[in-house]
Amino acid sequence: MNTARILSIAAVAAFASIGAQAGELNGNLYGTDFEAHVQSTRNSTEVRAEGQKALPNFAKGPVADYAARTTSNLDRAAVRSDALVAIRAHQIATGERS
């Protein structure tokens, strides 16, 4: 009985794995061949030229510039005392449950 049960479980597992990997009729399994269905309208030299033109400004955002120009009008002690007041009033989360 144990042998029959093991064989039936193995058969069900084999059918399930075959069904899980069944792709489209053209053999496109999990969309791995999606590039074959795309028709390009630009040639590679245009795309490379556009990339080279955009390269000097890559990953330069205004966040660093604004952070460098911003100055605070509070000192460290005032910020710490405001934080302690907010913690005691349960306005901000503290500790491991935050």
Image (cartoon, rainbow, N blue to C red):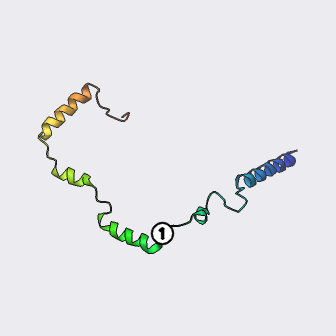
- Residue at image location 73% in from the left, 59% down from the top: 25
Residue at 29% from the left image edge and 31% from the top image edge? 92
Circle 1 Cα neighbour tier, 10 Å, few/some/many (<14 / 14–19 / ≥20): few
In the picture shown, does residue 74 fall above or below 7?
A: above
| Residue 83 x %, y % | 21, 33
Pointer 1: what residue?
A: 42
Q: Nearer the viewer, residue 98 or 58?
A: 58
- Judging depth in this view, the residue of 67 and 1 nearest the camera is 67
Foreground pick, 87 / 43: 43
The residue sitting at the bottom extreme is 45
Residue furthest to the front: 41
The x and y percentages for residue 40 are 53, 67
Residue 65 percent location from the top left of the image:
21, 54
Left or right of 27? Residue 92 is left
Q: Position of residue 90 (x, y in %)?
A: 29, 26
Name the quarter where the C terminus is drawn.
Answer: top left
In the image shown, does 66 or 13 lie closer to the viewer?
Answer: 66
Q: Secondary structure at mark 1?
A: loop
